[in-house]
Amino acid sequence: MDKNEWISRFDDLICSPSIREFYGEREFFNVGYWLSHTQDQQEASSTLMEKLLEFIPNKQGTILDVG
């Protein structure tokens, strides 16, 4: 699969109705970090972001997640 085909497939995936229903109109599109008490995808995605941000000791300005 070449780069353009991969990009097209990825775009088709994230725009598909079932995926949009699952993620909604949220800013996340990741599997998340699930704990035993995690309630839903949004919480898992937020937890993943917090876990990743723990590695940045002095958080200032805007942080861009480019996954």
Image: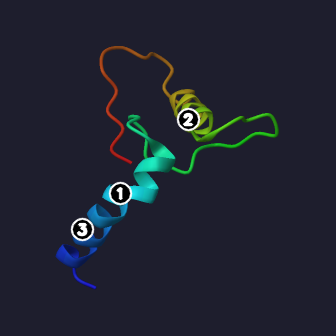
Q: Please report whichever mark, 3 or 1, sits nearer to the chain's N-terminal start.
A: 3
Q: Which mark is residue 64?
A: none
Give the quarter of the image for residue 12. bottom left
Q: Is residue 64 above or below residue 14?
A: above
Q: Tell which of 12 and 46 is nearer to you.
A: 12
What SS does tag 1 mark? helix
Q: Residue furthest bottom?
A: 1
- Residue marked by disc 3: 7
Q: Is residue 23 above or below residue 62?
A: below
Q: Residue furthest right?
A: 36
Q: Amino acid at mark 1?
A: Ile
Q: Tell which of 14 and 67 is nearer to you.
A: 14
Q: Can you give x and y, in whole percent of width and height, for residue 21 in the image?
A: 46, 48
Q: Which mark is residue 14?
A: 1
- Residue marked by disc 2: 42
**Where the N terminus falls, by quadrant?**
bottom left
Label 1 – label 2 distance at C-alpha: 16 Å
Q: Please report whichever mark, 1 or 2, sits nearer to the chain's N-terminal start.
A: 1
Q: Can you give x and y, in whole percent of width and height, for residue 17 in the image?
A: 38, 57
